Image (cartoon, grey):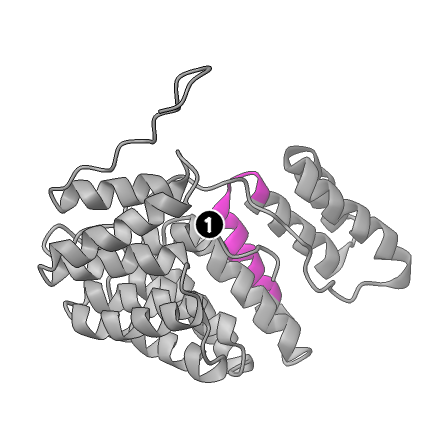
């Protein structure tokens, strides 16, 4: 994919409950986007170097790349130049314009290279999500899935778009498809659990979380989500046990530690005090 998926704790922020549902998960601003590079569009042999240079500049200095790529379009740069424009727009924060560009390129390719067209629709979906348009993201991701139904990551992407719309049944259905394609994926189990919790069924959430923790017993996001699911069931002692397990393992000040502390506060418990260092030169 052009844009790597965000860390799981950020994705769970998309699944944060409304005030009328279970305890929300705090949303914490994410790190800068990491761009590993997409499958390249087929460009004329004499344009390959210019395409690679343009895409590299779009990742590093998008405000410089955008006018250069637009000039290249006017000079007949074709799909390669348009793709560079779309990436530069994304990197410069013009998410809606970027999404529209990715979609237009995919449409204009006709029936050629379905795998690449699916990737372009995925990129459009990610840009629409950054623009805050989850409905348009889901529409683009649906077009990607029409072309590539066996990719679990695409089902997760659309599930997250539905979650952002608080369309929990559709989100759960997409996470189901992802898990069928990639069984015992702990992160998707945690995402589905969060969707079950937000849908008002913390019992089903706990089934997924216990399965996830049987695979990865110290998985901090699974422990945190199980804490919130237990809170939704009114099981404060069980919730506090999970939050305290996270605090015992997570670095102080980390996202996991902050969320565990927030969970304890929601449960009406105080977080454990930090260990006191022994006096210098003596024993405690």
Q: Tell me: 191 left or right of 89.
A: left
Q: Residue furthest right?
A: 46
Residue placed under numbered mark 1 in the picture? 96
Residue 120's image quarter? bottom right
Q: Residue furthest front?
A: 283
- The spot of residue 44 in percent (x, y) is 85, 63
Q: Is residue 165 visible?
A: no
Q: Secondary structure at mark 1?
A: helix
Q: Residues within 10 Å of mark 1 (few under 14, many from 20)?
A: many
Indicate yes or no whether the magenta region holds residue 211: no
Q: Is residue 67 above or below residue 267?
A: above
Q: Residue furthest top?
A: 280
Q: Residue at x 34, y 44 (%)?
A: 247
Q: Which residues are magenta?
A: 91-105
- The spot of residue 59 in percent (x, y) is 67, 43
- The spot of residue 33 in percent (x, y) is 56, 45
Q: Residue at x 23, y 53 (%)?
A: 241
Q: Main secondary structure of the magenta part?
A: helix
104 and 221: which is toward the camera: 221
Figure disc tally: 1
Which quadrant is the C terminus positioned in?
Answer: top left
Which quadrant is the N terminus positioned in?
Answer: bottom right
């Amino acid at each position: 994919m052009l844009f790597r998926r965000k860390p799981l704790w950020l994705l769970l922020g998309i699944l944060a409950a409304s005030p009328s549902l279970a305890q929300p998960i705090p949303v914490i601003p994410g790190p800068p986007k990491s761009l590993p590079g997409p499958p390249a569009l087929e460009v004329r042999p004499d344009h390959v170097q210019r395409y690679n240079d343009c895409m590299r500049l779009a990742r590093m200095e998008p405000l410089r790349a955008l006018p250069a790529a637009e000039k290249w379009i006017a000079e007949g740069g074709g799909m390669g130049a348009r793709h560079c424009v779309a990436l530069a727009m994304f990197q410069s924060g013009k998410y809606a314009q970027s999404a529209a560009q990715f979609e237009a390129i995919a449409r204009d390719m006709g029936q050629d290279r379905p795998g690449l067209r699916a990737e372009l629709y995925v990129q459009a979906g990610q840009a629409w999500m950054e623009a805050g348009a989850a409905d348009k993201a889901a529409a683009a991701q649906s077009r990607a899935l029409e072309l590539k139904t066996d990719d679990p990551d695409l089902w997760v992407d659309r599930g997250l778009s539905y979650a952002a719309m608080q369309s929990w049944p559709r989100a759960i259905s997409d996470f189901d498809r992802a898990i069928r394609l990639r069984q015992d994926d702990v992160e998707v189990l945690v995402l589905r659990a969060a969707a079950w919790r937000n849908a008002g069924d913390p019992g089903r959430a706990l089934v997924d979380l216990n399965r996830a923790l049987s695979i990865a017993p110290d998985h901090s996001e699974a422990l945190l989500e199980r804490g919130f699911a237990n809170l939704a069931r009114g099981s404060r002692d069980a919730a506090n046990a999970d939050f305290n397990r996270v605090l015992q393992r997570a670095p102080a000040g980390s996202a996991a530690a902050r969320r565990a502390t927030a969970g304890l506060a929601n449960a009406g418990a105080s977080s454990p005090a930090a260990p006191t260092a022994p006096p210098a030169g003596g024993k405690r």
